[in-house]
Image (cartoon, rainbow, N blue to C red):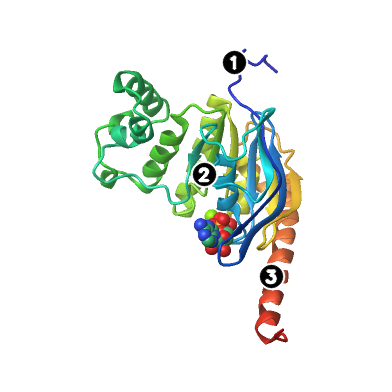
Amino acid sequence: MAEKASRPKAVSIGVEGVSKGFRGGVQALESVTLAAESGQFVSLVGPSGCGKSTLFNIIAGLIEPDHGTVHFGADDVTGTTGHVGYMLQRDLLLPWRTVLDNVLLGLDVARVPRRDSEPRARELLARFGLSKFAKAYPIQLSGGMRQRCAVIRTILYDAPVFLLDEPFSALDAQTRLLMQEWLLDVWDTLGKTVFYITHDLDEALYLSDRVYVMSARPGHVIADVAVALERPRDHAIRTSAAFLDYKVQLAALVRAEAEQSLAAEEVAPSGPSS
Ligand SMILES: Nc1ncnc2c1ncn2[C@@H]1O[C@H](COP(=O)(O)OP(=O)(O)OP(=O)(O)O)[C@@H](O)[C@H]1O
Ligand SMILES: [Mg+2]
């Protein structure tokens, strides 16, 4: 393995003992501990509403946990912002801005002068296959291109860690496969730490070094699966015996969790009232 450059491109990130409840009585997260080592690609899967996006908001410092801490390298960054690039769930491009203006949105808001930000944006658009569309508007792009723009907008921050919340969930299955390959290429080129949320077990396995499985609400970690599939990965790996073994293992965990929460829902309404 090559020596890392002196300035760290990537940094480890994690949470320890994080709990979060919302007003109105929803307990979203209960004592969640998980981590991504520097340069790792780590995914988070779990039922809808189990607190995955809430966890990302906490890691990004947009909301504070009731208990627990967020670590960025050796630093405690709980409740502070600025250490990660964050692509929110349903992160949309603004229809009235061009591709270039969309990817520069965050830096414009942060008042980074265009003479500094624009060359870097153009370089990233070129490197990731969108330079011909710099002046196009979102409506002129395919769904896959729009999502690539949204990812580029996130990585333009050049943070050592990126949080990507279901970036490809709205795409058709075939485009999604292509976007996964594209994303691995981006990750390989940039060498950053990535935390990734998805409902798609294939996607989680194909991309990740590690997959955390979360329980139904209140969300906590029920499994931590190290994915020892060789890299670089291409689409052929999806049909390998090792890949399918992992998939069976993950699917069993997710299914057991779904069955438990379904059973709990069935019992709850007819249970004795206190
Ligand atoms: N600001 C808030 N105020 C009150 N409740 C909230 C708030 N944000 C999230 N919740 C609730 O917390 C729970 C967890 O929500 P969250 O969006 O984190 O789940 P998720 O795992 O990302 O779900 P999905 O897979 O559908 O995206 C949900 O019940 C949600 O309604
Ligand atoms: Mg979510």
What percent of the width, then of the height, locates residue 80? 56, 36
Residue placed at 61% from the left, 26% from the top?
A: 10
Tell me, yes or no, if residue 43 can be seen here: yes
What percent of the width, then of the height, locates residue 227? 72, 41
Q: Nearer the viewer, mark 3 or mark 2?
A: 2
Residue type highlighted by circle 2: Leu
**To which quarter of the image does residue 74 belong?**
top right
Total count of labels: 3
Residue type highlighted by circle 1: Arg
**Image quarter (top left, top right, bottom left or bottom right) of the C terminus:** bottom right
User: Considering only order in the chain, which callout, 2 or 3, is on the residue closer to the N terminus?
Assistant: 2
Residue 261 is labelled as 3
Tell me: residue 262, above or below residue 146.
below
Residue type highlighted by circle 3: Ser
Question: Marks 1/3: CA distance?
Answer: 45 Å
Dot 3 falls on a residue whose secondary structure is helix
What percent of the width, then of the height, locates residue 56? 57, 46
Tell me, yes or no, if residue 240 can be seen here: no
**To which quarter of the image does residue 114 belong?**
top left
The residue that disc 2 covers is 62
Dot 1 falls on a residue whose secondary structure is loop
**Image quarter (top left, top right, bottom left or bottom right) of the N terminus:** top right
Dot 2 falls on a residue whose secondary structure is loop
Residue 7 is labelled as 1
Residue 25 left/right relative to 213: left
Tell me: residue 172, above or below residue 132.
below
Please tell me how crowded label 3 is: few (under 14), some (14-19), or many (20+) other residues with Cα within 10 Å.
Answer: some
Residue placed at 41% from the left, 35% from the top?
A: 153
